[in-house]
Protein backbone atom coordinates (compact mmCIF):
# COMPACT_ATOMS: atom_id res chain seq x y z
CA UNK A 1 0.00 0.00 0.00
CA UNK A 2 2.82 2.34 0.86
CA UNK A 3 4.42 1.83 -2.54
CA UNK A 4 1.09 2.45 -4.30
CA UNK A 5 0.53 5.64 -2.28
CA UNK A 6 4.02 6.85 -3.09
CA UNK A 7 3.51 6.10 -6.78
CA UNK A 8 0.23 8.05 -6.84
CA UNK A 9 1.81 11.02 -5.08
CA UNK A 10 4.76 11.02 -7.47
CA UNK A 11 2.44 10.77 -10.49
CA UNK A 12 0.34 13.70 -9.30
CA UNK A 13 3.47 15.72 -8.51
CA UNK A 14 4.90 15.03 -11.96
CA UNK A 15 1.59 15.94 -13.61
CA UNK A 16 1.46 19.23 -11.69
CA UNK A 17 5.11 19.97 -12.45
CA UNK A 18 4.39 19.69 -16.16
CA UNK A 19 1.10 21.56 -16.15
CA UNK A 20 1.65 24.34 -13.62
CA UNK A 21 3.22 26.47 -16.35
CA UNK A 22 -0.26 26.72 -17.92
CA UNK A 23 -1.57 28.57 -14.87
CA UNK A 24 1.53 30.59 -13.94
CA UNK A 25 1.43 34.37 -14.27
CA UNK A 26 4.58 36.49 -14.17
CA UNK A 27 4.67 39.19 -11.48
CA UNK A 28 5.86 41.81 -13.95
CA UNK A 29 3.03 41.00 -16.33
CA UNK A 30 0.57 41.31 -13.44
CA UNK A 31 2.06 44.72 -12.65
CA UNK A 32 1.48 45.85 -16.24
CA UNK A 33 -2.04 44.47 -16.03
CA UNK A 34 -2.64 46.46 -12.83
CA UNK A 35 -1.43 49.69 -14.44
CA UNK A 36 -3.62 49.06 -17.49
CA UNK A 37 -6.61 48.18 -15.33
CA UNK A 38 -6.30 51.39 -13.31
CA UNK A 39 -5.78 53.48 -16.44
CA UNK A 40 -8.75 51.91 -18.23
CA UNK A 41 -10.99 52.44 -15.19
CA UNK A 42 -9.96 56.08 -14.99
CA UNK A 43 -10.58 56.53 -18.71
CA UNK A 44 -14.01 54.93 -18.37
CA UNK A 45 -14.98 57.22 -15.48
CA UNK A 46 -13.90 60.32 -17.40
CA UNK A 47 -15.76 59.22 -20.55
CA UNK A 48 -18.93 58.43 -18.62
CA UNK A 49 -18.80 61.77 -16.77
CA UNK A 50 -19.07 63.70 -20.05
CA UNK A 51 -22.78 62.77 -20.15
CA UNK A 52 -23.25 62.61 -16.39
CA UNK A 53 -26.35 64.81 -16.30
CA UNK A 54 -28.04 63.02 -19.18
CA UNK A 55 -27.33 59.44 -18.11
CA UNK A 56 -27.14 59.43 -14.31
CA UNK A 57 -29.38 62.16 -12.91
CA UNK A 58 -33.13 62.36 -12.37
CA UNK A 59 -33.39 65.17 -14.91
CA UNK A 60 -31.80 62.96 -17.59
CA UNK A 61 -32.98 60.01 -19.62
CA UNK A 62 -32.93 57.43 -16.81
CA UNK A 63 -34.61 58.26 -13.46
CA UNK A 64 -33.53 55.95 -10.66
CA UNK A 65 -36.94 54.29 -10.39
CA UNK A 66 -36.89 53.47 -14.10
CA UNK A 67 -33.31 52.16 -13.93
CA UNK A 68 -34.37 49.58 -11.34
CA UNK A 69 -37.01 48.28 -13.77
CA UNK A 70 -34.40 47.70 -16.47
CA UNK A 71 -32.06 45.73 -14.20
CA UNK A 72 -32.18 41.98 -14.53
CA UNK A 73 -30.53 41.90 -11.10
CA UNK A 74 -29.00 44.16 -8.49
CA UNK A 75 -25.29 44.26 -7.72
CA UNK A 76 -24.07 42.81 -4.43
CA UNK A 77 -23.76 46.33 -3.00
CA UNK A 78 -26.37 48.52 -4.80
CA UNK A 79 -24.90 51.86 -3.69
CA UNK A 80 -26.64 53.69 -6.54
CA UNK A 81 -29.98 53.12 -4.77
CA UNK A 82 -29.05 55.04 -1.62
CA UNK A 83 -29.83 58.43 -3.13
CA UNK A 84 -30.77 59.88 -6.52
CA UNK A 85 -29.13 63.23 -5.71
CA UNK A 86 -26.43 64.62 -7.96
CA UNK A 87 -24.07 64.87 -4.97
CA UNK A 88 -24.33 61.16 -4.18
CA UNK A 89 -24.21 59.93 -7.77
CA UNK A 90 -21.35 62.29 -8.60
CA UNK A 91 -19.54 61.19 -5.44
CA UNK A 92 -19.52 57.60 -6.71
CA UNK A 93 -17.74 58.82 -9.85
CA UNK A 94 -15.19 60.85 -7.92
CA UNK A 95 -14.37 58.05 -5.49
CA UNK A 96 -14.06 55.54 -8.33
CA UNK A 97 -11.63 57.90 -10.05
CA UNK A 98 -9.42 58.00 -6.94
CA UNK A 99 -9.63 54.22 -6.60
CA UNK A 100 -8.53 53.85 -10.23
CA UNK A 101 -5.45 55.95 -9.48
CA UNK A 102 -4.78 53.78 -6.41
CA UNK A 103 -4.87 50.65 -8.56
CA UNK A 104 -2.69 52.27 -11.21
CA UNK A 105 0.12 53.11 -8.76
CA UNK A 106 -0.42 50.01 -6.61
CA UNK A 107 -1.32 51.72 -3.35
CA UNK A 108 -3.55 49.63 -1.03
CA UNK A 109 -4.13 47.63 -4.18
CA UNK A 110 -6.40 44.86 -2.98
CA UNK A 111 -8.69 47.25 -1.08
CA UNK A 112 -8.83 49.67 -4.02
CA UNK A 113 -9.62 46.83 -6.42
CA UNK A 114 -12.46 45.55 -4.25
CA UNK A 115 -13.97 49.00 -3.74
CA UNK A 116 -13.61 49.80 -7.46
CA UNK A 117 -15.44 46.55 -8.29
CA UNK A 118 -18.27 47.58 -5.93
CA UNK A 119 -18.55 51.15 -7.25
CA UNK A 120 -18.27 50.25 -10.93
CA UNK A 121 -21.09 47.71 -10.51
CA UNK A 122 -23.25 50.42 -8.90
CA UNK A 123 -22.50 52.96 -11.65
CA UNK A 124 -23.24 50.42 -14.38
CA UNK A 125 -26.52 49.54 -12.63
CA UNK A 126 -27.54 53.22 -12.45
CA UNK A 127 -28.21 53.23 -16.21
CA UNK A 128 -28.20 49.71 -17.70
CA UNK A 129 -29.04 50.95 -21.20
CA UNK A 130 -25.66 52.65 -21.73
CA UNK A 131 -23.65 49.48 -21.02
CA UNK A 132 -22.24 46.98 -23.52
CA UNK A 133 -20.00 43.91 -23.63
CA UNK A 134 -16.81 45.74 -22.71
CA UNK A 135 -18.34 46.77 -19.38
CA UNK A 136 -19.12 43.14 -18.45
CA UNK A 137 -15.58 42.11 -19.34
CA UNK A 138 -14.11 44.94 -17.25
CA UNK A 139 -16.16 43.80 -14.25
CA UNK A 140 -14.89 40.24 -14.76
CA UNK A 141 -11.25 41.38 -14.85
CA UNK A 142 -11.73 43.41 -11.67
CA UNK A 143 -13.27 40.43 -9.89
CA UNK A 144 -10.51 37.95 -10.73
CA UNK A 145 -7.93 40.64 -10.00
CA UNK A 146 -9.02 40.44 -6.37
CA UNK A 147 -7.38 37.00 -6.17
CA UNK A 148 -4.09 37.91 -7.83
CA UNK A 149 -0.98 39.60 -6.32
CA UNK A 150 -1.29 42.71 -8.49
CA UNK A 151 0.76 44.70 -6.00
CA UNK A 152 3.77 42.35 -6.01
CA UNK A 153 5.84 44.35 -8.49
CA UNK A 154 6.33 48.02 -9.47
CA UNK A 155 3.89 49.34 -6.88
CA UNK A 156 3.65 51.58 -3.84
CA UNK A 157 2.65 48.54 -1.82
CA UNK A 158 5.75 46.68 -2.98
CA UNK A 159 7.91 49.61 -1.89
CA UNK A 160 6.13 49.82 1.47
CA UNK A 161 6.48 46.11 2.25
CA UNK A 162 9.95 45.32 1.07
CA UNK A 163 10.39 45.54 -2.65
CA UNK A 164 9.13 43.61 -5.62
CA UNK A 165 8.83 39.86 -5.98
CA UNK A 166 10.43 38.00 -8.86
CA UNK A 167 9.28 34.98 -10.81
CA UNK A 168 5.72 33.86 -11.33
CA UNK A 169 2.70 32.99 -9.23
CA UNK A 170 0.54 29.87 -9.39
CA UNK A 171 -2.63 30.00 -7.33
CA UNK A 172 -6.35 29.42 -7.50
CA UNK A 173 -6.63 33.02 -8.71
CA UNK A 174 -4.21 32.43 -11.59
CA UNK A 175 -6.08 29.25 -12.57
CA UNK A 176 -9.36 31.22 -12.56
CA UNK A 177 -7.87 33.99 -14.69
CA UNK A 178 -6.54 31.62 -17.37
CA UNK A 179 -9.78 29.63 -17.46
CA UNK A 180 -11.82 32.84 -17.74
CA UNK A 181 -9.77 33.97 -20.73
CA UNK A 182 -10.26 30.61 -22.41
CA UNK A 183 -14.00 30.74 -21.69
CA UNK A 184 -14.36 34.14 -23.41
CA UNK A 185 -13.05 32.87 -26.73
CA UNK A 186 -14.20 29.25 -26.65
CA UNK A 187 -17.83 30.10 -25.90
CA UNK A 188 -17.62 33.01 -28.33
CA UNK A 189 -16.66 30.40 -30.93
CA UNK A 190 -19.54 28.09 -29.93
CA UNK A 191 -22.07 30.91 -30.19
CA UNK A 192 -21.24 31.57 -33.87
CA UNK A 193 -23.36 28.75 -35.21
CA UNK A 194 -25.49 30.55 -37.82
CA UNK A 195 -25.41 29.96 -41.58
CA UNK A 196 -23.58 33.23 -42.29
CA UNK A 197 -20.62 32.16 -40.15
CA UNK A 198 -20.60 28.64 -41.54
CA UNK A 199 -20.77 29.89 -45.13
CA UNK A 200 -18.00 32.45 -44.62
CA UNK A 201 -20.20 35.52 -45.22
CA UNK A 202 -20.50 36.83 -41.64
CA UNK A 203 -17.67 39.40 -41.67
CA UNK A 204 -18.98 40.91 -44.93
CA UNK A 205 -22.37 41.41 -43.27
CA UNK A 206 -20.75 42.81 -40.10
CA UNK A 207 -18.79 45.37 -42.14
CA UNK A 208 -22.03 46.55 -43.73
CA UNK A 209 -23.40 47.48 -40.29
CA UNK A 210 -22.72 51.23 -40.38
CA UNK A 211 -23.52 51.53 -36.67
CA UNK A 212 -20.17 49.87 -35.93
CA UNK A 213 -17.96 49.91 -39.03
CA UNK A 214 -14.99 52.24 -39.49
CA UNK A 215 -13.66 53.59 -42.78
CA UNK A 216 -11.20 50.71 -42.98
CA UNK A 217 -13.97 48.16 -42.51
CA UNK A 218 -16.02 49.76 -45.29
CA UNK A 219 -12.98 49.83 -47.60
CA UNK A 220 -12.50 46.08 -47.10
CA UNK A 221 -15.97 45.43 -48.53
CA UNK A 222 -14.32 45.68 -51.95
CA UNK A 223 -12.50 42.40 -51.25
CA UNK A 224 -15.14 39.68 -50.67
CA UNK A 225 -12.66 36.79 -50.90
CA UNK A 226 -10.52 38.41 -48.22
CA UNK A 227 -13.58 38.90 -45.99
CA UNK A 228 -14.50 35.26 -46.38
CA UNK A 229 -11.01 34.41 -45.19
CA UNK A 230 -11.44 36.77 -42.22
CA UNK A 231 -14.66 35.01 -41.26
CA UNK A 232 -13.00 31.61 -41.06
CA UNK A 233 -9.91 33.13 -39.44
CA UNK A 234 -12.05 34.60 -36.66
CA UNK A 235 -13.63 31.20 -35.99
CA UNK A 236 -10.21 29.53 -36.14
CA UNK A 237 -8.62 31.95 -33.67
CA UNK A 238 -11.53 31.77 -31.22
CA UNK A 239 -11.25 27.97 -31.22
CA UNK A 240 -7.47 27.57 -31.32
CA UNK A 241 -6.42 30.27 -28.82
CA UNK A 242 -8.21 28.75 -25.78
CA UNK A 243 -6.89 25.29 -26.71
CA UNK A 244 -3.32 26.59 -26.87
CA UNK A 245 -3.69 28.21 -23.45
CA UNK A 246 -3.78 24.73 -21.92
CA UNK A 247 -0.70 23.40 -23.72
CA UNK A 248 2.18 23.44 -21.18
CA UNK A 249 4.75 24.96 -23.52
CA UNK A 250 5.92 28.56 -23.69
CA UNK A 251 5.50 28.72 -27.47
CA UNK A 252 1.85 27.65 -27.22
CA UNK A 253 1.08 30.45 -24.79
CA UNK A 254 2.99 32.95 -26.92
CA UNK A 255 1.05 31.87 -30.00
CA UNK A 256 -2.31 32.08 -28.17
CA UNK A 257 -1.54 35.57 -26.88
CA UNK A 258 -0.37 36.68 -30.33
CA UNK A 259 -3.50 35.37 -32.02
CA UNK A 260 -5.77 37.14 -29.52
CA UNK A 261 -3.85 40.42 -29.86
CA UNK A 262 -4.09 40.33 -33.67
CA UNK A 263 -7.81 39.50 -33.45
CA UNK A 264 -8.57 42.37 -31.08
CA UNK A 265 -6.45 44.86 -33.03
CA UNK A 266 -8.45 43.86 -36.09
CA UNK A 267 -11.70 44.52 -34.20
CA UNK A 268 -10.45 47.91 -33.01
CA UNK A 269 -9.35 49.04 -36.47
CA UNK A 270 -12.43 47.87 -38.40
CA UNK A 271 -15.24 48.45 -35.90
CA UNK A 272 -16.32 51.03 -33.32
CA UNK A 273 -16.86 48.77 -30.29
CA UNK A 274 -16.08 51.19 -27.48
CA UNK A 275 -13.91 49.76 -24.71
CA UNK A 276 -14.35 46.12 -25.71
CA UNK A 277 -11.16 45.59 -27.81
CA UNK A 278 -9.02 47.42 -25.26
CA UNK A 279 -10.42 45.50 -22.30
CA UNK A 280 -9.83 42.31 -24.29
CA UNK A 281 -6.22 43.31 -24.99
CA UNK A 282 -5.75 44.05 -21.30
CA UNK A 283 -7.05 40.57 -20.49
CA UNK A 284 -4.08 38.84 -22.16
CA UNK A 285 -1.39 40.99 -20.51
CA UNK A 286 -0.98 38.73 -17.42
CA UNK A 287 -0.16 35.81 -19.72
CA UNK A 288 2.84 37.55 -21.24
CA UNK A 289 6.08 36.02 -19.96
CA UNK A 290 9.54 35.04 -21.08
CA UNK A 291 10.50 31.38 -21.13
CA UNK A 292 10.02 29.13 -18.08
CA UNK A 293 10.57 31.48 -15.19
CA UNK A 294 10.77 30.37 -11.58
CA UNK A 295 7.30 29.84 -10.12
CA UNK A 296 5.93 29.52 -6.64
CA UNK A 297 2.49 28.96 -5.22
CA UNK A 298 1.03 32.09 -3.67
CA UNK A 299 -1.25 32.24 -0.67
CA UNK A 300 -0.33 35.82 0.11
CA UNK A 301 -2.65 38.47 1.42
CA UNK A 302 -3.19 38.31 5.17
CA UNK A 303 -3.11 35.30 7.47
CA UNK A 304 -2.81 31.77 6.12
CA UNK A 305 -6.37 30.99 7.27
CA UNK A 306 -7.77 34.04 5.49
CA UNK A 307 -5.76 33.17 2.38
CA UNK A 308 -7.24 29.68 2.27
CA UNK A 309 -10.77 31.05 2.69
CA UNK A 310 -10.14 33.53 -0.11
CA UNK A 311 -8.82 30.82 -2.42
CA UNK A 312 -11.69 28.52 -1.53
CA UNK A 313 -14.17 31.28 -2.46
CA UNK A 314 -12.28 31.92 -5.70
CA UNK A 315 -12.42 28.22 -6.58
CA UNK A 316 -16.16 28.11 -5.96
CA UNK A 317 -16.67 31.19 -8.12
CA UNK A 318 -14.54 29.63 -10.87
CA UNK A 319 -16.55 26.39 -10.96
CA UNK A 320 -19.84 28.34 -10.89
CA UNK A 321 -18.68 30.61 -13.74
CA UNK A 322 -17.81 27.61 -15.93
CA UNK A 323 -21.18 26.00 -15.18
CA UNK A 324 -22.90 29.30 -16.07
CA UNK A 325 -21.21 29.46 -19.48
CA UNK A 326 -22.00 25.81 -20.21
CA UNK A 327 -25.63 26.44 -19.29
CA UNK A 328 -25.77 29.60 -21.44
CA UNK A 329 -24.53 27.61 -24.43
CA UNK A 330 -27.17 24.95 -23.79
CA UNK A 331 -30.02 27.49 -23.95
CA UNK A 332 -28.51 29.04 -27.10
CA UNK A 333 -27.18 32.09 -25.24
CA UNK A 334 -30.66 33.19 -24.08
CA UNK A 335 -30.15 34.36 -20.49
CA UNK A 336 -33.87 34.44 -19.78
CA UNK A 337 -33.93 30.63 -19.96
CA UNK A 338 -30.98 30.02 -17.63
CA UNK A 339 -33.00 28.98 -14.61
CA UNK A 340 -34.35 26.06 -16.62
CA UNK A 341 -30.89 24.43 -16.47
CA UNK A 342 -29.24 26.02 -13.42
CA UNK A 343 -30.44 26.39 -9.80
CA UNK A 344 -31.91 29.83 -9.16
CA UNK A 345 -29.55 30.45 -6.22
CA UNK A 346 -26.54 29.90 -8.49
CA UNK A 347 -27.94 32.23 -11.16
CA UNK A 348 -28.71 34.92 -8.57
CA UNK A 349 -25.30 34.59 -6.91
CA UNK A 350 -23.35 34.93 -10.15
CA UNK A 351 -25.48 37.89 -11.21
CA UNK A 352 -24.72 39.69 -7.96
CA UNK A 353 -21.02 38.96 -8.34
CA UNK A 354 -21.25 40.25 -11.95
CA UNK A 355 -19.94 36.98 -13.33
CA UNK A 356 -23.13 36.76 -15.39
CA UNK A 357 -21.54 36.65 -18.81
CA UNK A 358 -22.41 35.75 -22.37
CA UNK A 359 -19.75 35.90 -25.06
CA UNK A 360 -22.00 35.96 -28.09
CA UNK A 361 -21.25 39.11 -30.07
CA UNK A 362 -22.64 38.93 -33.63
CA UNK A 363 -24.08 35.51 -32.84
CA UNK A 364 -25.49 33.13 -33.90
CA UNK A 365 -25.34 35.37 -36.98
CA UNK A 366 -24.62 39.11 -37.36
CA UNK A 367 -27.76 41.29 -37.29
CA UNK A 368 -29.01 42.42 -40.66
CA UNK A 369 -30.91 45.45 -39.32
CA UNK A 370 -28.98 48.71 -39.48
CA UNK A 371 -29.82 52.40 -39.50
CA UNK A 372 -29.56 55.79 -37.85
CA UNK A 373 -31.78 58.17 -35.89
CA UNK A 374 -33.26 61.54 -36.81
CA UNK A 375 -34.87 63.81 -34.19
CA UNK A 376 -36.91 66.04 -36.51
CA UNK A 377 -38.14 69.05 -34.51
CA UNK A 378 -40.38 71.80 -35.89
CA UNK A 379 -40.05 75.28 -34.37
CA UNK A 380 -42.65 78.05 -34.10
CA UNK A 381 -41.14 79.80 -37.12
CA UNK A 382 -41.62 76.56 -39.13
CA UNK A 383 -37.91 75.78 -39.19
CA UNK A 384 -37.16 72.05 -39.02
CA UNK A 385 -34.01 71.07 -37.11
CA UNK A 386 -32.31 67.81 -36.09
CA UNK A 387 -31.96 67.75 -32.29
CA UNK A 388 -29.63 64.75 -32.22
CA UNK A 389 -27.13 66.27 -34.65
CA UNK A 390 -27.69 69.80 -33.29
CA UNK A 391 -28.18 70.87 -36.90
CA UNK A 392 -30.25 73.81 -38.16
CA UNK A 393 -30.90 71.88 -41.37
CA UNK A 394 -32.71 68.56 -41.39
CA UNK A 395 -30.96 65.81 -43.36
CA UNK A 396 -32.67 62.48 -43.96
CA UNK A 397 -29.70 61.03 -45.81
CA UNK A 398 -27.21 58.64 -44.27
CA UNK A 399 -24.56 60.42 -42.14
CA UNK A 400 -21.00 60.12 -43.36
CA UNK A 401 -20.15 58.34 -40.10
CA UNK A 402 -23.25 56.59 -38.72
CA UNK A 403 -21.43 55.35 -35.61
CA UNK A 404 -20.36 58.87 -34.64
CA UNK A 405 -23.85 60.28 -35.33
CA UNK A 406 -25.18 58.81 -32.08
CA UNK A 407 -22.97 61.08 -29.97
CA UNK A 408 -20.49 58.63 -28.45
CA UNK A 409 -20.36 54.96 -27.48
CA UNK A 410 -22.60 55.40 -24.41
CA UNK A 411 -25.28 57.24 -26.37
CA UNK A 412 -24.99 54.64 -29.13
CA UNK A 413 -25.55 51.82 -26.63
CA UNK A 414 -28.55 53.68 -25.22
CA UNK A 415 -30.19 54.39 -28.59
CA UNK A 416 -29.55 50.91 -29.98
CA UNK A 417 -31.08 49.42 -26.83
CA UNK A 418 -34.17 51.54 -27.41
CA UNK A 419 -34.46 50.43 -31.04
CA UNK A 420 -33.60 46.76 -30.64
CA UNK A 421 -35.74 46.25 -27.54
CA UNK A 422 -38.63 48.28 -28.97
CA UNK A 423 -38.59 50.71 -26.02
CA UNK A 424 -40.27 54.12 -26.06
CA UNK A 425 -37.85 57.05 -26.62
CA UNK A 426 -40.15 59.42 -24.73
CA UNK A 427 -37.66 60.10 -21.91
CA UNK A 428 -34.81 61.00 -24.25
CA UNK A 429 -37.20 63.06 -26.42
CA UNK A 430 -38.31 65.04 -23.37
CA UNK A 431 -34.68 65.53 -22.36
CA UNK A 432 -33.63 66.88 -25.78
CA UNK A 433 -36.71 69.12 -25.98
CA UNK A 434 -35.98 70.64 -22.56
CA UNK A 435 -32.35 71.20 -23.53
CA UNK A 436 -33.36 72.86 -26.81
CA UNK A 437 -36.05 75.15 -25.36
CA UNK A 438 -33.85 76.36 -22.53
CA UNK A 439 -33.07 80.03 -23.12
CA UNK A 440 -34.55 80.10 -26.62
CA UNK A 441 -36.61 83.01 -28.00
CA UNK A 442 -40.36 82.21 -28.44
CA UNK A 443 -39.98 81.90 -32.23
CA UNK A 444 -37.27 79.27 -31.74
CA UNK A 445 -39.21 77.12 -29.30
CA UNK A 446 -40.23 73.64 -30.36
CA UNK A 447 -43.84 72.88 -31.30
CA UNK A 448 -43.52 69.29 -32.57
CA UNK A 449 -41.07 66.41 -32.67
CA UNK A 450 -40.70 63.15 -34.54
CA UNK A 451 -38.16 60.54 -33.50
CA UNK A 452 -37.48 58.51 -36.64
CA UNK A 453 -35.33 55.43 -37.13
CA UNK A 454 -34.02 55.20 -40.69
CA UNK A 455 -33.94 51.42 -40.97
CA UNK A 456 -31.84 49.52 -43.48
CA UNK A 457 -31.68 45.82 -44.19
CA UNK A 458 -28.19 44.55 -44.98
CA UNK A 459 -27.16 41.50 -46.94
CA UNK A 460 -23.87 40.25 -48.29
CA UNK A 461 -24.46 41.97 -51.65
CA UNK A 462 -26.04 45.32 -50.80
CA UNK A 463 -28.05 47.53 -48.46
CA UNK A 464 -31.77 48.18 -48.77
CA UNK A 465 -33.40 51.57 -49.33
CA UNK A 466 -33.86 53.16 -45.88
CA UNK A 467 -37.34 52.86 -44.39
CA UNK A 468 -38.65 55.60 -42.10
CA UNK A 469 -39.88 54.07 -38.84
CA UNK A 470 -41.52 56.60 -36.51
CA UNK A 471 -40.61 55.70 -32.94
CA UNK A 472 -42.25 58.66 -31.17
CA UNK A 473 -44.33 61.74 -32.03
CA UNK A 474 -45.16 64.83 -29.99
CA UNK A 475 -46.76 68.16 -30.73
CA UNK A 476 -47.68 71.14 -28.57
CA UNK A 477 -51.39 70.50 -29.19
CA UNK A 478 -51.24 67.16 -27.41
Image (cartoon, grey):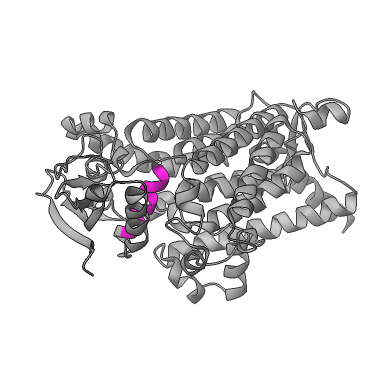
The outermost residue toward the left is 465
**Is 155 left, or right, of 393 in this rendering?**
right
Q: Is residue 415 magenta?
A: yes
**Is 268 left, or right, of 84 in this rendering?**
left
Whether 383 is drawn above or below 85: the answer is above
The outermost residue toward the top is 290
Q: In which quarter of the image is residue 351?
A: bottom right
Q: Position of residue 397 (x, y in %)?
A: 14, 42
Whether 128 is drawn above or below 276: the answer is below
Q: Which of 153 and 78 is in front in this view?
A: 78
Q: Is residue 4 magenta?
A: no
* Quadrant of the rendering where the N terminus is positioned: bottom right
The magenta segment: 409-418
Q: Where is residue 192 in the image (x, y as percent from the top left)?
A: 35, 52
Q: In which quarter of the image is residue 236?
A: top left
Q: Which of 297 and 404 is in front in this view?
A: 404
The residue positioned 33% from the left and 63% from the top of the image is 426
Q: Which of 38 and 178 is in front in this view?
A: 38
Q: Position of residue 337 (x, y in %)?
A: 44, 72
From this viewpoint, is residue 411 visible? yes
* Quadrant of the rendering where the C terminus is positioned: bottom left
**Is 32 left, or right, of 233 in this rendering?**
right
The residue positioned 17% from the left and 49% from the top of the image is 458
From this viewpoint, is residue 186 visible? no
Amino acid sequence: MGAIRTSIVETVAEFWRRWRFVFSLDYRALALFRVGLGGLLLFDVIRRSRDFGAHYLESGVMPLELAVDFLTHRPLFPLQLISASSVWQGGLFVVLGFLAVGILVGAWTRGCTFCAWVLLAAIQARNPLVNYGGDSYLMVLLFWGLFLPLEACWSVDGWRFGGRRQGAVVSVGSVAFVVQLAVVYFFGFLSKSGPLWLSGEAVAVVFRIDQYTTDLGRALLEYPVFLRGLTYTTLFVEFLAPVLLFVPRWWARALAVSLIIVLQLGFASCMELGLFPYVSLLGVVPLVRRGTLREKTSLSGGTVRFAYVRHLFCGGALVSMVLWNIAVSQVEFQRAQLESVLPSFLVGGLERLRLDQSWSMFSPDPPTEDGWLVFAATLRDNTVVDLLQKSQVINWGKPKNVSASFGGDRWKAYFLNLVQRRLSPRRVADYFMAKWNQGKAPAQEMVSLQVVFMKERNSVQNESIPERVILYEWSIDR
